[in-house]
Image (cartoon, rainbow, N blue to C red):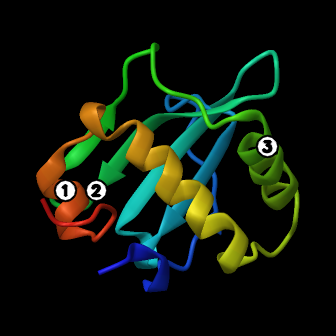
Amino acid sequence: MSRIGTNFDFFKTVMPDSRKADFYLGCLEGSVFMDFNESSDGLITLCRISFDGHGCCNLPEATNFLDFQMSKSFLEEIAKDQLNQNRITPLIIEIIKINQEFIWTDALQEYNLIDGV
């Protein structure tokens, strides 16, 4: 089953100063929160993801970035007041997929953020 059909309902949010990142998104009615950073050359990476019932998963600094075009699309979308779910969802799914090795598999499966393995 493809995750793209899932209604994650991504939304922009803020986090306390103790949780530093450039951008913050929540989804699934606040059950999952993701923190993103932008590199000096404009590429986006996932630095942290937290799941209700699992806690906060900090990714190592050497994570995988979205490519230039996807990073550009992410930045364009995050600048909007209202996120276009059809545009942001594949970008978030991709950044999770390329960093899957750093994130708890059971949490990703529970929240349908990866295909079943």
Q: How crowded is mark 3: few (under 14 residues within 10 Å), some or many (20 or more)?
A: few
**In terms of depth relative to the viewer, which is nearer, 50 or 83?**
83
Q: Could you tell whether 62 is left or right of 108 in the image?
A: right
Query: In terms of sequence position, does the residue under pointer 3 or pointer 1 come before the other?
Result: 3
Q: How far across and down, in percent of the image, does residue 57 sit? A: 29, 37
User: Dot 1 corresponds to which residue?
Assistant: 107
Q: In this view, does 20 lie above or below 4?
A: above
Q: Is residue 51 above or below residue 18?
A: below
Query: In terms of sequence position, does the residue under pointer 2 or pointer 1 come before the other?
Result: 2
Q: How far across and down, in percent of the image, does residue 75 sit? A: 81, 47
Where disc 2 sits, the SS reads strand
Q: Residue 51 carries which label?
A: 2
Inspect this view and state whether residue 7 appears.
Answer: no
Task: Give the amino acid type for the residue marked by disc 2 in the picture.
Answer: Phe
Where disc 1 sits, the SS reads helix
User: Dot 3 corresponds to which residue?
Assistant: 69
